[in-house]
Image (cartoon, grey):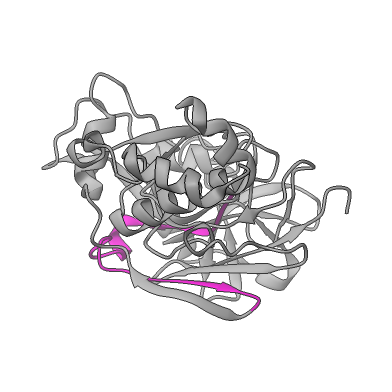
């Protein structure tokens, strides 16, 4: 199933199933009528209902009414993730992003070339060994999520805005102390994650060796969508074609495979001594060349970013200036 959250003509946010690309099945309305269990009134309820909930929805869809897609507005399929974790799993991206960060820092000094040489001599261009040894991630803000075709508002202090092409896992859970062998059993589905970033702010603040703060933590900064595709429709989540476009210009075409740590291994590691809950979102990291940072190419106000992942769809967002 391709699960969405939509706003209907009455202004109500509802979970639904996208059918054929142009119709939506209203899960909340159908489960309120059938009397066969709890009303599944939002996406978290759908996820928490698990396989039995999906089977119930499938039965109701057989004779249920649908709504034209043009009559509703798609929101983020998971408007309020229980938690957001964003990993860094692709070596090409990590290497190029580190080099870009060093260049940005050097540009702020009186002698950028001399500063770059000092950075190289100090080993600052190298990936720390721990990255190869275990999955690494930061926790994002689940309250700052937007969906497809939503505007992303540039933070007032940001000059260098960027997008990130990422595959994300939605956890069904609850699950704890998983292994790489059973970790995928905890996955409910997959979606697209665009971790919009203010690279100038990020480059400055991460000199303190904390994770990103205001470089990524701002309203509208986490775009998710257009849907959550349930696991039964994704045969191999590490073999999906991934594409990024800016204003229709293709910036990268790659695949979801090739991460330093597998999806299963990453989920297993995160679950050690920590319960993963229904609705947790784990992004696998930006693919190589999957953002502008790597080439020091940034977004202008009005630019439209489209991220596409095979089997999931297209997540489209426009960057706008603060106050627009």
Residue 23 seen from this side? yes
**Does residue 227 belong to the magenta stretch?**
yes
Q: Farthest residue in the top direction?
A: 273
Residue at image x 55%, y 63%? 64
Q: Quadrant of the N terminus?
A: bottom left
Residue at image x 82%, y 54%? 321
List x then y, in percent, for residue 146. 65, 49
Q: Quadrant of the C terminus?
A: bottom right
Which segment is the magenta one?
A: 222-247
**Which of the pair 27/240 is nearer the observer?**
240
**Which of the pair 39/86 is nearer the observer?**
86
**Does residue 323 belong to the magenta stretch?**
no
Q: Farthest residue in the left direction?
A: 181
Residue 35 seen from this side? no
Above or below, comparing residue 304 to residue 26 in the picture? below
**Which of the pair 217/122 is nearer the observer?**
122
List x then y, in percent, for residue 236. 23, 63
Residue at image x 31%, y 40%? 123
Q: Farthest residue in the right direction?
A: 323
List x then y, in percent, for residue 317. 66, 62
Q: How many marks?
A: 0
List x then y, in percent, for residue 184. 22, 46
Above or below, comparing residue 159 to residue 306 in the picture? above
Above or below, comparing residue 257 to residue 209 in the picture? below
**Which of the pair 27/259 is nearer the observer?**
259
Above or below, comparing residue 24 to residue 154 in the picture? below
């Amino acid at each position: 199933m391709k699960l969405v959250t939509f706003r209907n003509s009455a202004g109500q946010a509802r979970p639904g199933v996208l059918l054929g690309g142009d119709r939506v099945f209203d899960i909340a309305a159908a489960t309120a009528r059938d009397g066969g269990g709890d009303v599944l009134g939002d996406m978290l309820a759908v996820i928490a209902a698990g396989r039995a909930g999906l089977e119930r929805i499938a039965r109701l869809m057989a004779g249920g009414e649908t709504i034209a897609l043009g009559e509703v507005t798609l929101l983020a399929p998971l408007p309020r993730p229980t938690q957001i974790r964003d990993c860094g799993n692709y070596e090409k991206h990590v290497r190029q992003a580190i080099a870009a960060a060093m260049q940005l820092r050097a540009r702020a000094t009186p002698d950028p070339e001399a500063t770059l040489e000092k950075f190289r001599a100090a080993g600052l261009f190298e990936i720390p060994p721990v990255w190869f040894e275990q999955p690494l991630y930061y926790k994002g803000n689940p309250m700052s999520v937007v969906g497809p075709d939503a505007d992303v508002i540039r933070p007032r202090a940001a000059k260098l805005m960027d997008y990130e092409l990422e595959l994300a896992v939605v956890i069904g859970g609850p699950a704890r102390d998983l292994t790489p062998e059973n970790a995928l059993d905890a996955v409910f589905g997959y979606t697209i994650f665009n971790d919009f970033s203010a690279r100038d702010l990020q480059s400055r603040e991460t000199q303190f060796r904390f994770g990103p703060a205001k470089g990524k933590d701002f309203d509208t900064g986490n775009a998710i969508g257009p849907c959550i595709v349930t696991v039964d429709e994704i045969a191999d989540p590490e073999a999906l074609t991934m594409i990024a476009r800016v204003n229709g210009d293709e910036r990268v075409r790659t695949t979801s495979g090739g991460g330093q740590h597998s999806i299963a291994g990453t989920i297993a590691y995160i679950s050690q001594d920590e319960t993963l809950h229904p609705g947790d979102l784990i992004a696998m990291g930006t693919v190589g060349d999957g953002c502008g940072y790597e080439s020091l190419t940034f977004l202008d106000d009005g630019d439209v970013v489209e991220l596409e992942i095979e089997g999931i769809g297209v997540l489209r967002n426009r960057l706008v200036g603060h106050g627009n």
